Image (tube, rainbow, N blue to C red):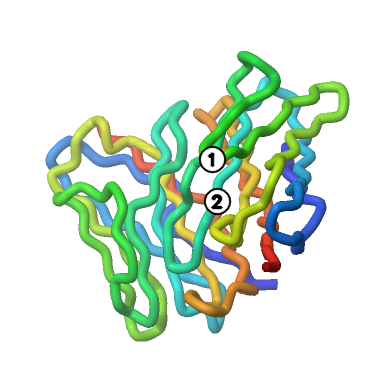
Amino acid sequence: AAGVIQSPRHLIKEKRETATLKCYPIPRHDTVYWYQQGPGQDPQFLISFYEKMQSDKGSIPDRFSAQQFSDYHSELNMSSLELGDSALYFCASSGGTGARLGNTIYFGEGSWLTVV
Amino acid sequence: AQSVTQLDSHVSVSEGTPVLLRCNYSSSYSPSLFWYVQHPNKGLQLLLKYTSAATLVKGINGFEAEFKKSETSFHLTKPSAHMSDAAEYFCVVSYADTGGFKTIFGAGTRLFVKA
């Protein structure tokens, strides 16, 4: 079965550069979540989208932005990268929100960003 | 291979009764274990975590979990369910690996609370 696809799996950037991570949700899933997990840290929720609109916002820095496109894939853009941005970035998707409590959230394997 | 298994995809309890959400893990390393809760349209919220200290871990909202190495389990419990506990719960394992560290999420357990 198709899963959540993230690309690239590994990315190395220099400080002050820009990085873009992509997330392809499971087909027919309309909700995408982004999480950041630093080394030895808990995963931190960044932002989520439902039907191409931002639905919730967590601890996402102002240097980061994200959007969900018409085909429901999402991109996380990170500018002016700092060493502390080095982390594993998870994307997750689900089939809906709100009253549809039966929807399970599926996670991708993550994208490793290393800032040097 | 490392893995996390949440033994129930759905759990239904009545308000005021105990909650038990089961999680088993497989890890060759000394893992950190977490429970997260996710309400609809919200990000993951950390309930509690185990990082090789006390085996009985207390978290927020009255939840607690016990790390049992012999059983490779980390079940989540709460003495008395509240309607606001209805959500999806994720058991998560994190461990150091040669390439850095890895995090594995369980498939989730949907908790329903009946009035």
Confirm or deny contact between disc 2 and disc 1 (CB under 8 A).
Answer: yes
Front residue (pair A91, A10): A91
Q: Is residue A58 left or right of residue B88?
A: left
Q: Within 10 Å of the Cα at label 2, are there few (<14), some (14-19), or many (20+) other Cα atoms?
A: many
Q: Is residue B49 above or below residue A52?
A: above
Q: Which mark is residue A57?
A: none
Q: Position of residue B41 (x, y in %)?
A: 43, 67
- Please state which of residues B83 and A50 is positioned toward the viewer in this rendering: B83
**Label 2, label 1: how many angstroms apart (C-alpha)?**
7 Å
Q: Is residue B1 visible?
A: no
- Disc 1 sits on a residue from what chain? B
In this view, B37 is above or below A5: above
Query: Residue A70 at what x, y percent from top left?
Result: 34, 85
Which quarter of the image is occupied by the C terminus of chain B? bottom right
Image-quadrant location for residue A76: bottom left
Residue at the extreme right: B71
For the question of whether residue A44 can be seen, the reply is: yes
The mark that comes first in sequence, 2 or 1, is 2
* Residue tagged 1: B47
The picture quadrant where one finds residue A1 is bottom right
Mark drawn on residue B37: 2
